[in-house]
Image (tube, rainbow, N blue to C red):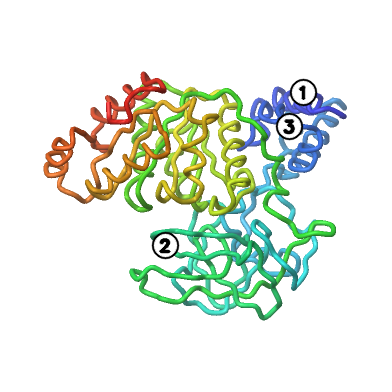
């Protein structure tokens, strides 16, 4: 099989005989947009499985026997490894959720104990203690795994410039690692770097310290998260209407708003694509969108970027690729959540992009208080945003007092937990077109 279409046709033949999908998290149709080089690089195990099963099918094997083969070769890449899993000779307790691919045979790679690492390079870390501001790692299933002294876990190098959580980075975009170099865990999803600041609200005011036990190598260079995915798209495809979900900081209810918007869209019978376009990768947020009913859901680690605290030359094409990935899934509407605040994580590059904003029907915005709302509206004006901005009632505030103050400013807000109000706002956004007032409809 020399072409992508030949592989897809062979896979469909096998699925038709089995009466079910081969891969629960991958539709064969989604492979059609890839080049044969990207397909072989990123989905070599799936290709091998398709070729093997199609050959058995051609030899006359009965569907029941074919099903037994499917179970035997475990083509879904799922396993239940217990508390440890041996990777390159190390007893790995968990793989951070920033590494989304679950079908990778990690033992096909090699490793080094020292070297220069850059953003997205994949490493195996060993915990130096059981104590730190973050001592749990979110694994690939979205479960938080407690990490103790001596535990090994797999993660990536990167940056996190959070305004509410841990702040750290790779100095000058890289870090030279020796076996005794201390590195800090910057987030639950699994990003390592040089820790700079911890919020005063944390009970523990020291970073969770690790040594990098192994730097994974792919041929003659470090294995990077990007190596597990096709190359980023260079231009944006025509898109379904986009509803952006933004705010003034983390932890003010944006994911709750996203879930309410998605549920309202599902009540309208829409096929919904959900994305987190900015922030620090966390699978928990995507799972919330899935639970709300999103038909497709991705964020930047799903295209090989650990966080959007990076250069615009990396974050913007990753965002384009994410939106293209959703639109190839034939969604009716895209709900795009932006983590953190609207002035960091390269969010301005999205909100000021004519390429993306031409498909925007509006922005749902959350702030902690009235002055935060007024400052945010001014910043949207500064960005040149021309689509409607719909305001949510700040959580943990008095709704009556909020509405009164907003009326004084000729503004209004809605309650994301009120089904009727949410349906009205989402319905209005679906009718919006670029060029209307920035103020709430």
Residue beneath disc 1: 9
**Above-or-below relation of 227 to 24:** below
Pair 2/3: label in front: 2
Image quadrant holding the N terminus, namely top right
Q: Where does the image place residue 405, in percent across and percent down from the top left?
A: 14, 41
Measured Cα–Cα span from mark 3 to mark 1: 15 Å
Q: What residue does disc 2 label?
A: 165
- Crowding at dot 1, Cα within 10 Å, few <14 / some 14-19 / many 20+, comes out as some
Residue 380 % position (x, y): 37, 38
Badge number at residue 34: 3
Closest to the observer, 134 or 59: 134
Report the number of numbered marks. 3
Residue 403 at what x, y percent from top left? 15, 39
Residue 92 falls left or right of residue 340: right
> Sequence order check: which comes first, mark 2 or mark 1?
1
Q: CA distance from mark 2 to mark 1?
A: 47 Å
Residue under the point 54% across and 50% down: 308
Q: Which of the two residues, 224 or 346, is positioned nearer the viewer here?
A: 346
The crowd level at tag 2 (other Cα within 10 Å; few <14, some 14-19, many 20+) is many
């Amino acid at each position: 099989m020399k072409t992508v279409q030949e592989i897809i046709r062979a896979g469909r033949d096998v699925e038709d005989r089995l009466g079910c999908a081969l891969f629960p998290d991958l539709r064969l149709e989604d492979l059609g947009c890839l080049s044969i080089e990207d397909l072989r690089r990123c989905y070599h195990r799936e290709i091998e499985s398709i070729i093997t099963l199609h050959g058995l099918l051609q030899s006359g094997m009965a569907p029941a026997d074919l099903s037994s083969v499917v179970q035997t070769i475990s083509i879904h890449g799922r396993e239940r490894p217990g508390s440890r899993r041996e990777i390159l000779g190390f007893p790995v307790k968990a793989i951070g959720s920033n590494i989304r691919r679950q079908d990778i045979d990690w033992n096909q790679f090699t490793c080094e104990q020292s070297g220069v690492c850059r953003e997205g390079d994949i490493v195996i870390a060993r915990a130096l203690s059981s104590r730190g501001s973050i001592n749990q790692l979110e694994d690939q299933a979205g479960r938080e795994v407690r990490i103790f002294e001596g535990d090994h876990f797999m993660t990536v190098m990167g940056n996190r410039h959070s305004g509410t959580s841990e702040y750290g980075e790779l100095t000058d975009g890289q870090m030279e690692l020796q076996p005794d170099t201390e590195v800090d865990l910057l987030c639950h999803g699994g990003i390592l770097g040089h820790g700079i600041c911890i919020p005063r609200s944390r009970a523990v005011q020291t970073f969770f310290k690790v040594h990098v036990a192994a730097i994974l190598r792919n041929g003659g260079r470090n294995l990077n998260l990007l190596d597990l995915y096709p190359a980023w798209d260079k231009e944006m495809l025509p898109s379904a209407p986009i509803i952006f979900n933004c705010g003034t900081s983390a932890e003010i209810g944006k994911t709750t708003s996203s879930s309410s918007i998605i549920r309202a869209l599902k009540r309208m019978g829409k096929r919904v694509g959900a994305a987190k376009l900015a922030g620090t990768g966390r699978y928990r947020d995507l799972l919330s969108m899935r639970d709300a009913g999103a038909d497709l859901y991705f964020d930047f680690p799903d295209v090989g970027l650990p966080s959007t605290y990076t250069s615009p030359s990396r974050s913007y094409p990753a965002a384009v690729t994410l939106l293209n990935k959703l639109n190839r899934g034939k969604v009716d509407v895209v709900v795009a959540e932006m983590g953190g605040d609207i002035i960091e994580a390269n969010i301005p590059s999205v909100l000021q992009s004519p390429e993306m904003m031409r498909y925007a029907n509006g922005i749902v915005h959350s702030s902690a208080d009235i002055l935060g709302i007024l400052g945010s509206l001014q910043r949207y004006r500064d960005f040149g945003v021309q689509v409607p901005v719909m305001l949510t009632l700040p959580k943990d505030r008095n709704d009556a007092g909020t509405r009164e103050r907003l009326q004084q400013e000729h503004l209004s807000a809605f309650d994301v937990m009120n089904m009727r109000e949410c349906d009205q706002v989402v319905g209005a956004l679906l009718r919006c077109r670029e060029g209307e007032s920035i103020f709430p409809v």
